[in-house]
Image (tube, helix red, strand yellow):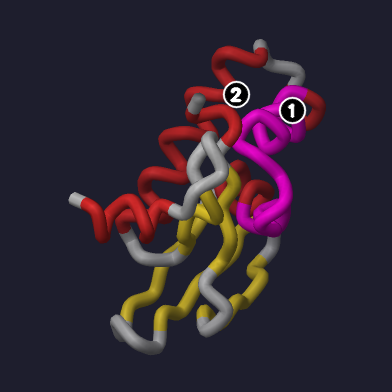
Amino acid sequence: MMEDIKYRKRPDIVVQNVGSEVLLLDMNGNKLHQLNTTASMLWEAIDGVRSVSDLATILVEAFDIEKERALDDVSQTMKVLREAGLVDSVDSPDGSTLEAQDDLS
């Protein structure tokens, strides 16, 4: 399940907090990314241990929203962060690494 996936931040991303938002500088891609308040909250919580479901719970508690909406928000945010190359999946729900699965394709 997507809810079980865990993400980790790329360690080489430079982070600058600006109010309730976060700026991420990708030195390899030479790109600057601005995260809104919700994405910033998720960025701070991404640790390679918390799952998508855990991250959604953080949003539920912070914004008093339904879990389903929070899961959608987290999934969309993780998709954007992953496509931007800012986070990687730690592993798939069955415990195998996604990189290993990609090698088999």
Q: Which mark is residue 70?
A: 2
Q: Earlier in the sequence, mark 2 or mark 1?
A: 1
Residues 80 and 102: in front is 102
Residue name at image x 49 percent, y 42 percent:
92
What secondary structure is marked by label 2?
helix
- Seen in the picture, residue 42 relative to 31 is either above or below; the reply is above
Residue name at image x 50 percent, y 25 percent:
1
Residue name at image x 64 percent, y 68 percent:
18
Q: Residue furthest right?
A: 61
Q: Which mark is residue 57?
A: 1
Residues 101 and 73: in front is 101
Residue 20: in sight, yes or no? no
Residues 57 and 98: in front is 98
Q: Position of residue 52 (x, y in %)?
A: 60, 36
Q: Position of residue 7 (x, y in %)?
A: 56, 52
Give the CA distance from mark 2 to mark 1.
Answer: 7 Å
Does the CB distance between marks 2 and 1 fall below 8 Å? yes
Q: What main secondary structure does the magenta stretch of the protein show? A: helix
- Seen in the picture, residue 41 relative to 72 is either above or below; the reply is below
- Seen in the picture, residue 86 relative to 89 is either above or below; the reply is below
Residue 50: in sight, yes or no? yes
Q: Position of residue 64 (x, y in %)?
A: 76, 18
- Magenta-colored span: 43-60
* Residues packed near mark 1 inside 10 Å, few (<14), some (14 to 19) or many (20 plus): some
Mark 1 belongs to which amino acid? Thr
